[in-house]
Image (cartoon, rainbow, N blue to C red):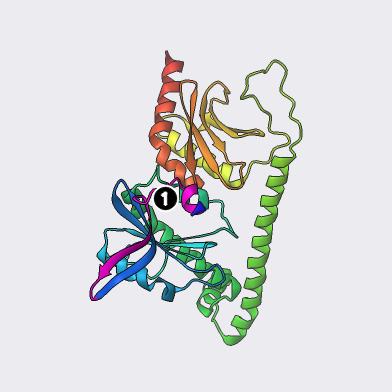
Amino acid sequence: MPFFQALGYDVFNPSEVIPEFTADVGVKKGEKVDYALCIDGRLSVLVECKPSTIDLDLKHASQLFRYFATTDARFAVLTNGVVYQFYSDIDQPNKMDEKPFFVFSLEAIKRTDPAILERFTRASFNIDAIIAEAGRLKLESQMRIELEKEFATPSDEFVRLMAARVQPGGRMTAATRELFQPILLNSIGALIRDRVNERLTSALNVANPAEPTLPEGQSDDMSTVEEGFVTTDDEIAGFRIVQAIAARHVDPGRIVIRDSKSYCAILLDDNNRKPLARLHFNSPTTRYVGTFAGKAETRHLVSAPIDIYKLEQQLVARVNELVAARDG
């Protein structure tokens, strides 16, 4: 119930959060699913709850499968109060998928989770938008599972692929496989450790940055110097995306990045009075990209730098605004 409340649903309104939702399914009468969420009178989400002491699997979702096919709900949630598995009908219309497109765990919250959960809030719920995103999320989730398997125990196919890239033309024999498999495992482990260390270093620098010294004569609130700050890989990726979008309308060499304690500024002509965007990527859980119209900044929630492409219209309008002001 607190989870529904956190998403903005009125748990005390029985027309919005319906406990023990009942529907007749074929010859089965009076079957109940634990909760149904209704938005503006429309059945939207079915929820089946299990004890927190059990691990969730498909056998716990039998009622969800039956109800999904006979109601108008497009989403179903299977939860034990700690883990929330979100399902839809991506593979076949009106038939609940066997694999969730999104899994949220209170014990292991990922940085991208808040942005995804926001789509399920009462205020932001949009079936078409969620369905469009669900297909990508499902593929991403399945890809991550397969990568985790390969990273833990590389398959013969993966070893063969990587060995062929390192030593083109070589034959894959049992001896070659025995040689390359531990090397591949060590390389993967070293790569992951290096990335983790980079993240930790960036976090420490954000939490305890050196005190910057402004150049003499500068007093604008966007004025910063780079000393004492570490520009992260995601901030660089975000900058490159903004630069790529702006490059269709202005020389990309005029687009520069300037980091600071609170945000990463992307400027035109390296002028702090000509902000194109701000990357607010310092939070470990929530990220925003700021766009500008005049002096007003509007923040947009994003889950990853690639989401900046969705802001192309605002960024192009800002580029044109600044170029027009200069020409004028």
Q: Position of residue 99 (x, y in %)?
A: 41, 68
- Residue 206 visible at all: yes
Taking the magenta stretch, the answer to whether it contains residue 43 is no
Q: Position of residue 269 (x, y in %)?
A: 54, 25
Q: Quadrant of residue 264?
A: top right
Helix, strand or loop status at disc 1:
loop
Q: Quadrant of residue 148?
A: bottom right
Q: Which residue is rendered at x = 61% and y = 47% of the image?
A: 284
Decide which of 4, 285 is in the foreground and name it: 4
Decide which of 203, 99 is in the foreground and name it: 99
Q: Is residue 91 left or right of residue 281?
A: left
Q: Quadrant of the C terminus?
A: top left
Q: Is residue 319 left or right of residue 28?
A: right
Taking the magenta stretch, the answer to whether it contains residue 6 is yes
Decide which of 66, 203 is in the foreground and name it: 66
Q: Which residue is rendered at x = 39% and y = 48% of the image?
A: 13
Instruction: Specify few, some or many for label 1: CA neighbours under 10 Å numbering under 14, 14-19, or 20 or more.
Output: some
Decide which of 1, 77 is in the foreground and name it: 1
- Residue 97 visible at all: no
Q: Which residue is rendered at x = 43% and y = 32% of the image?
A: 315
Q: Amino acid at mark 1?
A: Phe
Whether 259 is drawn above or below 194: the answer is above
Q: Position of residue 197 (x, y in %)?
A: 70, 54
Q: Position of residue 271 (x, y in %)?
A: 57, 23
Question: Which segment is the magenta one?
Answer: 3-27
Which residue is outermost to the bottom? Answer: 174
Whether 131 is drawn above or below 155: the answer is above
Q: Is residue 112 left or right of residue 126?
A: right
Q: Give the residue at mark 1.
A: 120
Q: Which residue is rendered at x = 34% and y = 52% of the image?
A: 38
Q: Is residue 108 left or right of residue 95?
A: right
